[in-house]
Amino acid sequence: MNGVSTTLVFGYTDEMVFVSARSRDDDIDLGEVLRNAFGQIGSAGGHAEMAGAQIPVGMLLEETDEADRGEVIEETISERFFETLGISLNRAAASVYADFIGVDGLE
């Protein structure tokens, strides 16, 4: 985890996605990043070093099968966050890392 200065975690219930982010990078204002990434589909805000968002699940899952629910949420949250930061998500590397630490996701 050397060199990691910014983290984003999220979880969801049947009705809401909860997002939390932290950063030690002086070049990133997480409150602004989360407002830009999620403000139009939910509520988001915070400070430069820590921020959060809440997004109604229904906004993300229109016409989505129940079996695809987790994948769609994960993909949407990750892509919007990285896109807002101007970072291209490397799904292959993320998948390898997820396998390495023993978690499912980013398949």
Image (cartoon, rainbow, N blue to C red):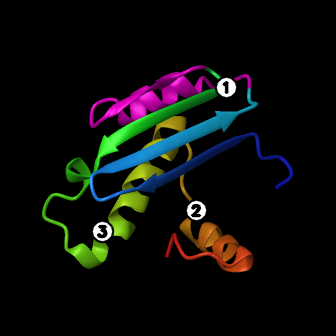
- Which quarter of the figure has residue 99? bottom right
Q: Quadrant of the N terminus?
A: bottom right
Going by the numbered disc 1, the residue's amino acid type is Glu
- Distance between mark 1 and mark 2 Cα atoms: 24 Å
> Could you tell whether 24 is left or right of 34 in the image?
right
Where is mark 3, residue-wise?
Answer: 69
Q: Which mark is residue 90?
A: 2
Based on the picture, tell me whether residue 31 belongs to the magenta stretch. yes
Going by the numbered disc 2, the residue's amino acid type is Asn
- Tell me if label 2 and label 3 are in contact, CB under 8 Å: no
Where is mark 1, residue-wise?
Answer: 49
Residue interval drawn in magenta = 26-47
> Could you tell whether 92 is left or right of 62 in the image?
right
Going by the numbered disc 3, the residue's amino acid type is Arg
In x, y percent, where is residue 22?
66, 36
- Distance between mark 1 and mark 3 Cα atoms: 30 Å
Residue at horizontal 48 percent and vertical 43 percent from the top:
19
Q: Earlier in the sequence, mark 1 or mark 2?
A: 1
- Tell me if label 1 and label 3 are in contact, CB under 8 Å: no
Q: Earlier in the sequence, mark 1 or mark 3?
A: 1
